[in-house]
Image (cartoon, rainbow, N blue to C red):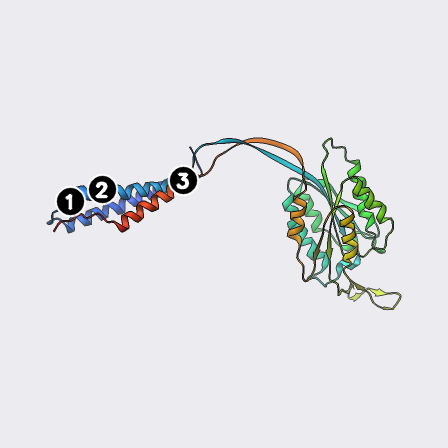
Amino acid sequence: MIWAYTDNRLIVILTAVFIILYALYLVRFWKINQKLKVRKRRLVWKMMLRSLYFLLFLVALAGPSIGSAMKEIKQEGKDIFLALDLSQSMNAQDISPSRLQRIKFELKNLVKNFSSDRIGIIIFSSEAFIQCPLTFDQNVIQLHLDGLNTNLVPNYGTDIAAPLNLAYEKFQADESPEPKSKAIILISDGEDFGENLSGTLSKLADEGIRVFSLGVGTETGTSIPRGSSVVMDPKSNRPAVTRLEASNLKMIANETSGEYFELSDISQEIPQLINAVEKLEGTVMASRMVEASANKYFYFLLAALILAMIDMMLPVRTLSI
């Protein structure tokens, strides 16, 4: 038998308290009934009943597990690249406090759900760069996420094909002998001024690399802050407005058998994104056999409650007047 609660101090304390209180009860009972005829046999049965269900309560508290079986625990892993748009439009504040600050907060929670997976970070705007190579080290990933800002990349427009192509090249260059599930989480407002996106998507689809796109922003959009002013549109000489272009991101996800999710003022789909990526079948990285057993405390607790109810509803007469 295996016990879930191995610290016996609480059980010893509860037993001592029960014995002391029940002893005081018996002494008080005896003093009150000194001159009356006491049926000792019934008093003994009463004490035995209470002691029995108290003992059952203690056993239930200790958490007994009866029977055991060996179970194989498999640790599966995937390779995931986070491709994060760091163009100036990610400073827009249509999502509080800003698109970038909000996504940094969400990503720090997201990566915690993939502790057995290798995660890498790609940052991009008009060009794409590896910010963090694929790694299991969660501390390194969190450190890189903390330092993300729009000054890390050149900002001459947004080319969504660039990070996807870079992720493809890194996946292809991986010399790991085990075939792994590969995925890209593309985070952007969807604005794209690049070329050759269709060719990149075809390569990803052929290799079974899924792209899960996360649209950040709102359809109404807002101006783009730059220091104490805003980014101006050179064509109209008015403040440039950035909007969520969901159609681009949906198309990317659809072409690679991925899914599209949104983070906006009305949609908070980070949990759905996590669930979708978790459903990807990972490669078995390691396995081990563990002894599994079921906690049977409920049966002891149920028996104790039944006896306690009997004690309350059918009290044993101890006096005969």
Task: For mark 1, give the secondary structure.
Answer: loop
Q: Residue reaching furthest left?
A: 35
Label 1 Cα neighbours within 10 Å, binned few <14 / some 14-19 / many ≥20: few
Instruction: Give the number of the mark in front: 3 or 2.
Output: 2
The quadrant of the image that shows the N terminus is top left
**Mark 1 belongs to which amino acid?**
Arg
Residue with the mark numbered 3: 62
**Mark 2 belongs to which amino acid?**
Trp
Q: Residue 215: name its quadrant.
A: bottom right
Label 3 Cα neighbours within 10 Å, binned few <14 / some 14-19 / many ≥20: many
Label 2 Cα neighbours within 10 Å, binned few <14 / some 14-19 / many ≥20: few
Residue at the image point whose x is 72% and y is 50% from the top:
259
Residue at the image point whose x is 14% and y is 50% from the top:
33
Mark found first going from the N terminus, 3 or 2: 2
**Mark 3 belongs to which amino acid?**
Ala
Residue 159 picture location, percent across and down: 83, 52
In this rendered view, identify the residue nearer to me: 293 or 150: 293
Instruction: Give the number of the mark in front: 1 or 3.
Output: 1
Task: For mark 3, give the secondary structure.
Answer: helix
In this picture, residue 233 sits left or right of residue 37: right
**Mark 1 and mark 3: Cα distance apart in space:** 36 Å
Mark found first going from the N terminus, 1 or 2: 1
Task: For mark 2, give the secondary structure.
Answer: helix
Q: Residue 285: name its quadrant.
A: top right
Residue 196 picture location, percent across and down: 87, 48
Residue with the mark numbered 2: 45
Residue with the mark numbered 1: 39
**Count of numbered badges drawn on the protein:** 3
In this picture, residue 319 sits left or right of residue 98: left
Residue 130 picture location, percent across and down: 78, 44
